[in-house]
Image (spheres, rainbow, N blue to C red):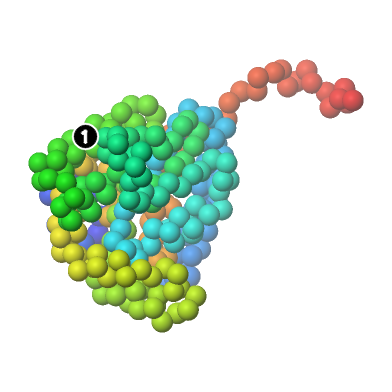
Amino acid sequence: MTQSIKLPLNKKVNLANFDPNYTGKYKSKKEMRKRLLKTQAEIIELQELLYAESKHALLIVLQAMDAGGKDGTIKHVMGAINPQGCDVVSFKVPSDEEASHDFLWRAHKAAPSQGKIVIFNRSHYEDVLVTRVHNFVSESTWKKRYDQINNFEKILAQNQITVLKFFLYISKDEQKARFRERIENPDKHWKFSPADLRERAHWDDYMEAFEDVFNRCNTKWGRWHIVPANDKRYRDLVVAETIAKALRGLNMKYPEPSVDIENISIDDIV
């Protein structure tokens, strides 16, 4: 049985219908590793082309529950590309300056310029997730934000910014196993926070909030991808292949030289 990664438009999403253990056609980690390396090499070439042409940009949105693998995905999928052309922006508790503006101000400020890739590690969607679950704003406020987010992403798309949105979907049992590893492995103690356990207590509320995000903010200019993420290798491969496909679809070309190369001789250089 196959499982959709890219969410179809205008179809109600229920996370109970998605298996976070799904690994598609791949039967071994070795097979996935081989495919990932090939796709990473393609992304490196496409990112250089994106940077050189400077007509398009790519915004990658990563959302997940704690221990869902956002940092690992960034490291293993994008770690080898030229850092001049890629930025990672982490969205934490708003600063005083950010809180004094509308909730999308910091996201728009961080959106990629032409030729760049920007990765949002968490994103503007926190303002219809954590703020909703913890009642930081009223229901009437967060309900208005779905349309505001859609309009924001539409503006980006109309300005040659491709928006790819990924939900790294792990099971509650897998999250518990990863928390246990962070507690028992001294090398991973730094990753653990008591706040993670407090957030885990709201698991069902978060799943409901995520479902509303998928049902309200899955548009033709900003599609959501639900990535089965219990298997880290498959998670990385799905994200990598989706990014590569999106970049290929831009039909980019290297720009023409600004001077007549044919009339320049290296022997004339002093």
Quadrant assignment, res 171: bottom left
In the image, taking residue 35 as reference, residue 164 lies left or right, namely: left
In the image, taking residue 140 as reference, residue 52 lies left or right, namely: right
Residue highlighted by disc 1: 148
Q: Is residue 69 above or below residue 223?
A: below
The amino acid sitting under disc 1 is Gln
> In the picture, which quadrant includes the C terminus?
top right
Quadrant assignment, res 257: top right
Q: What residue do we see at 46% from left, 41% from top?
A: 117
Residue at the far left: name it: 140
Residue 221 locus on image (x, y percent)? 28, 35
Q: Is residue 149 visible?
A: yes
Q: Is residue 104 above or below residue 5?
A: above
Comparing 147 with 139, the one in front is 139
> In the picture, which quadrant includes the N terminus?
bottom left
Q: Is residue 26 visible?
A: no
Residue 239 locus on image (x, y percent)? 39, 53
Comparing 26 with 41, the one in front is 41
Q: What residue do we see at 58% from left, 45% from top?
A: 82
